Image: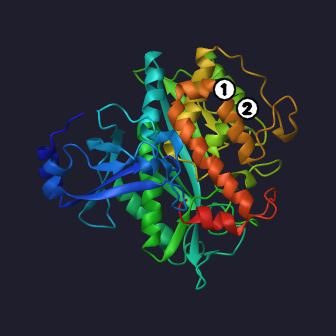
Amino acid sequence: MKHDLSAIREDLHSRGIDVLRFVYSDILGITRSKDMLVSQLEKSAENGPAFSQGVWITTTRGGVLDGGNIASDGLPDLITQLVPETITPMPWEPGVAYVITDAFNPDGSDNMLSPRMVLRKVIEEYRELGLQPVCGPELEFYIADRTPEGGFKRSLTATGRVYTSGATVDPRGTFLHLMRMLDQMNIGVFAGNHEFSPSQYEINMWHSEALDAADRTFLFKTAIKDIVSRTGQHATFLGKPWADEGGSGFHLHFSVTDFEGNNKMHDGKGELSETARQLIAGLTTNGNALTALTNPTVNAFKRLGPDTLAPYRSNWGYDNRSCMVRIPPERGQGTRLEVRVGDGAANPYLIIAGVLAAGLDGIKRKLVCAPDAVGMAYDNEGAEVLPETFAEALDALEANSNLHNHLAKEMVDVFLVLKRDEIARYEAEVSDPLTRDVTQWEIDEYLENY
């Protein structure tokens, strides 16, 4: 889609913005970007900027693989196009604004290796059914100090500070500064606090239509890492950065409405609707494969397990935080699902696309919802145990043609190439790959990037 770049340039100049940072997510969830001078926008952004499609097959260590025949085809271009409604000033960097981009092939067709384009495809399938998916993300993360040796340590050591704020849990004011900067970005942040583990925090965001929620979450994670880095500290969403403390999750509240905004998750009598039950059935039926997208690292599976306060089985329950899918107590317009299996390192576009695709499978195949789990659900033997290793999750994803069809098979194939390479490198370098301890390999591989 072509945009009036002259009008965009004039608007940006009127707001004192002279640099526009074009950003998009690669398949791993890493932010890729290019800074563009606003003065040159009509020329530079009319057909681009262009990037090498090698970005889709680049590992966290800088290796370039041959997924999707990209390397063997000579590393062709992908063409980005800005999405004007996502222009977001960076208050900590005066004169600079983010803008999210979509990715296209040189012939103008959609590039279906782009996580954002994959999510758009799934949302369109919902729209064809008269439904609009709505998502509300909840993310946790740690703030760490860099050590003289080049490593990381938690910036706080005091325990028992869950649901607190102020100088005792934010002695440098890093978190308070972060909240103020995020507020000025106007991306739907409304509250935050210290979490259960020392130096762990949670920031709450409002829910919205699924693509907007993914865009805001992508900017949220990108901004937090940039803002905290400028203080000399480091923010990480890695699911399990330290073996002796709890992990960081990415919980996703999910509902569907009609095009007038009417919630379709309840029956008007205080019970879940048939649509809601089909969504639950889709999520639990596809739980094993979905886990590869919601927990996309070797490290993520060290956060999961019985009695970890993270899901262990592919089950659901009413207001039950030991389940994979929790049904919060609100009804009416507030009726929704909470998918609790996500890991903080998950790509916002792919975790939302995966959840939507699994739910869509439930609707389209009219899957029947299993009985809800009652009490602590780790021993709920009627529900299948989720994959206990990343390799098991990838095997389940590879075998699940239903998810491939709703997502994009070419993206799934490249995701599998990237992640199987990750596992092979982990197993080659770690003496006991099945250890539940967090290894130095994981810190080196993930902590800076996630």
Q: Is residue 66 above or below residue 238?
A: above
Query: Relative to residue 285, is residue 232 drawn left or right?
Result: left
Q: Residue at x 63, y 20 (%)?
A: 362
Query: Relative to residue 384, is residue 159 drawn left or right?
Result: left
Look at mark 1 in the image and give the residue it sits on: 280
Q: Identify which residue, 310 or 113, lies in the foreground.
A: 113
Q: What secondary structure is found at the residue carrying circle 1?
A: helix
Pointer 2: residues within 10 angstroms few (<14), some, or many (20+)? many
Q: Residue at x 55, y 78 (%)?
A: 171
Task: Let me know if residue 271 appears in the view.
Answer: no
Image quarter in which the C terminus is found: bottom right
Q: Is residue 399 above or below residue 36?
A: above
Q: Is residue 352 above or below residue 372?
A: below
Pointer 1: residues within 10 angstroms few (<14), some, or many (20+)? many
Look at mark 2 in the image and give the residue it sits on: 316
Image quarter for residue 445? bottom right
Q: Identify which residue, 315 or 361, lies in the foreground.
A: 361
Query: Relative to residue 281, is residue 373 drawn left or right?
Result: right
Give the x, y percent position of residue 449. Answer: 53, 61
Q: Residue at x 40, y 21 (%)?
A: 259
Task: Let me know if residue 250 appears in the view.
Answer: yes
Q: Residue at x 80, y 31 (%)?
A: 373
Given the image, on which type of amino acid does mark 2 rest?
Trp
Image quarter for residue 177? bottom left
Given the image, on which type of amino acid does mark 1 rest?
Ile
Label located before the other in sequence (2 or 1): 1
Give the x, y percent position of residue 63. Answer: 53, 58
Image quarter for residue 359? top right
Q: Is residue 161 above or below residue 390?
A: below
User: Is the C-beta separation of discs 2 and 1 under 8 Å?
Assistant: yes
Q: Identify which residue, 253 or 66, lies in the foreground.
A: 66
